[in-house]
């Protein structure tokens, strides 16, 4: 079976070369590196828009399950003695670690459905839990889906979007995450007054998960994945569905030209960590680590306390943070394809330095108690706004663009695994550090990590705005 597959794959590649040569000889066909004829312009963004919204449901679910515990934790703790999200984080690590392997094996459509399945099961188990272990097991299932979802959404959006709107479409995943977070907070408001309402909050999350599994059945597979599997005819059909008939030849020819052989071989972990692509994997892992070390989780965790000192209820505080997150995500949507990924990252981390500086100043003896609250609240909202403009949405999109198609899924899973590991330790150590060194020193440390991020981005990150995935692979990541 293995020999027949290799022969078929070789025949396919020979046929592809003939196809490219024939296309290149066509008179009057002037193609850009985006695989689009200059005479016919860009494909319509409307053809792929609905599929982007479907994929963004995975990010919506990620945001929802991040926030669903916030408003319901007190009620769940009273009923089941449950006190945290640790199992969800463990499941998230597992899901992100194996996401690349799953995508490469079964494709995006089935992977999204596999992502939705543990979320449906986990939500149902949490909603019907009679004891602590039932809730913990449910959160483990949900966490597995949470680990899969962001990776799948980013990769799918990257591979099915036209190059000229890929940044805009990539921002939809961050907007979906913020909408999911706000939805969980709004739905959870009655939890403290209504007995058993927290169970409703978990049941609700099963609905978008079921819709994701259903709508993915009617969505096109990634043509890049189909091409890697030697299914050229299916890849053409997917391109026609996503871009339109006039753009299929150009997209297929460009996709074929970017192939360097060996696509059917399995990518080993050692190749990612120590091989030719180790630098870009290091850049990706470092970006995700710096994203978490910037202090974003501490801001979300500490927001209710800060707002409470200003006389604002926890519910209103969560709404304010959610609105700031949404506004920043919407700004990223408008600016991603205009300013570029690198500019947004530098501007975002720079704004976060200023915001952390304000929060550090509020904890110093130089500021009066009357001004302390305003500096702290203003710094917190500015931090969330700055984060959601760049440091939140850009790393996953940027890296999915920079990784060559052969390693894209597995490399993203490695980088996101580092995200979950750092996320876990920051959450584990934050309160201890806050008690031992105080908010002034801790916020200064976070600001320092943001400064390191600015320097790192300036020196290591390459701009991908407006370039096709094949152009990025050919021009920015040349072969050995």
Image: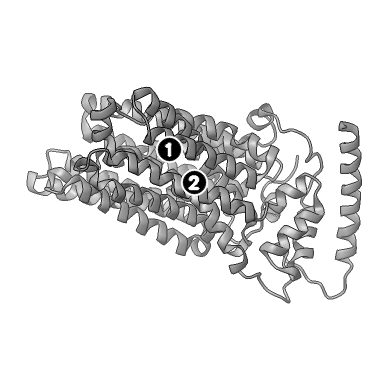
Q: Is residue 54 left or right of residue 72?
A: right
Q: Nearer the viewer, residue 78 or 296?
A: 78
Quarter that holds the N terminus: top right
* Mark 2 burial class by Cα count in 10 Å: few <14, some 14-19, many 20+: many
Q: Secondary structure at mark 1?
A: helix
Q: Nearer the viewer, residue 263 or 279?
A: 263
* Mark 1 burial class by Cα count in 10 Å: few <14, some 14-19, many 20+: many
Q: Is residue 206 above or below residue 255?
A: above
Q: Secondary structure at mark 2?
A: helix
Residue 399 image offset from top left, x and y in percent: 57, 45
Q: Is residue 93 above or below residue 391?
A: above
Residue 114 image offset from top left, x and y in percent: 58, 39
Q: Residue beneath label 2, please? A: 209
Residue 344 image offset from top left, x and y in percent: 45, 55
Q: Are marks 2 and 1 in contact (CB under 8 Å)?
A: yes
Residue 22 in sight from this viewpoint: yes
Residue 293 numbered tag? none
Colouring of the image: one colour
Q: Residue at x 53, y 29 (%)?
A: 94
Q: Residue at x 65, y 42 (%)?
A: 408
Q: Nearer the viewer, residue 416 or 124?
A: 124
Q: Is residue 4 left or right of residue 98?
A: right
Q: Is residue 269 left or right of residue 196?
A: right
Q: Residue at x 21, y 26 (%)?
A: 435
Q: Residue beneath label 1, please? A: 123
Q: Is residue 460 left or right of residue 345?
A: right
């Amino acid at each position: 079976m293995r020999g027949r597959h290799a022969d078929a794959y070789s025949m396919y590649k020979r046929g592809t070369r003939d196809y490219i040569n024939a296309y290149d000889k066509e008179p009057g066909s002037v193609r850009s590196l985006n695989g689009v004829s200059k005479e016919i312009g860009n494909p319509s963004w409307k053809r792929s828009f609905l599929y982007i919204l479907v994929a963004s449901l995975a990010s919506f679910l990620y945001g929802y399950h991040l926030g669903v515990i916030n408003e319901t934790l007190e009620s769940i703790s009273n009923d089941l003695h449950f006190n945290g999200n640790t199992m969800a984080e463990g499941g998230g690590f597992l899901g992100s670690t194996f996401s690349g392997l799953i995508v490469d094996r079964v494709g995006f459509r089935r992977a999204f459905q596999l992502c939705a399945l543990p979320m449906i099961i986990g939500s149902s188990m949490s909603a019907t839990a009679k004891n602590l272990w039932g809730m913990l097991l449910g959160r483990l299932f949900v966490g597995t889906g949470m680990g899969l979802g962001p990776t799948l959404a980013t990769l799918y959006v990257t591979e099915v979007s036209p190059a000229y709107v890929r940044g805009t479409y990539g921002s939809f995943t961050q907007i979906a995450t913020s909408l999911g977070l706000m939805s969980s907070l709004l739905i959870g408001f009655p939890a403290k007054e209504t007995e058993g309402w927290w169970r409703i909050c978990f049941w609700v999350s099963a609905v978008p998960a079921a819709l994701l599994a259903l709508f993915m059945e009617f969505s096109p597979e990634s043509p890049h994945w189909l091409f890697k599997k030697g299914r050229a005819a299916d890849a053409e059909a997917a391109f026609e569905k996503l871009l339109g008939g006039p753009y299929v030849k150009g997209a297929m020819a460009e996709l074929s030209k970017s192939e360097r052989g060996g696509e059917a071989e399995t990518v080993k972990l050692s190749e990612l960590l120590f091989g030719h692509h180790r630098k870009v994997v290091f850049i990706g892992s470092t970006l995700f680590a710096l994203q978490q070390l910037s202090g974003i989780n501490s801001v979300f965790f500490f927001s209710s306390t800060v707002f409470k000192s200003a006389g604002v209820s926890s519910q209103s505080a969560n709404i304010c943070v959610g609105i700031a997150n949404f506004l920043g995500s919407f700004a990223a949507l408008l600016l991603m394809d205009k300013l570029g990924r690198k500019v947004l990252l530098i501007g975002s981390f720079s704004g976060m330095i200023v915001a952390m500086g304000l929060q550090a100043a509020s904890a110093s003896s130089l500021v009066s108690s009357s001004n302390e609250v305003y500096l702290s609240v203003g710094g917190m909202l500015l931090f969330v706004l700055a984060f959601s403009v760049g440091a939140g949405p850009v790393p996953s999109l940027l890296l999915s663009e920079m990784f060559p198609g052969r390693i894209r899924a597995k490399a993203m899973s490695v980088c996101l695994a580092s995200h979950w590991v750092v996320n876990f330790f920051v959450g584990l150590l934050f309160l201890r550090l806050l008690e031992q060194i105080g908010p002034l020193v801790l916020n200064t440390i976070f600001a320092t990590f943001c400064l390191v991020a600015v320097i790192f981005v300036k020196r290591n990150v390459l701009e991908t705005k407006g370039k096709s995935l094949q152009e990025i692979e050919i021009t920015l990541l040349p072969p050995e």
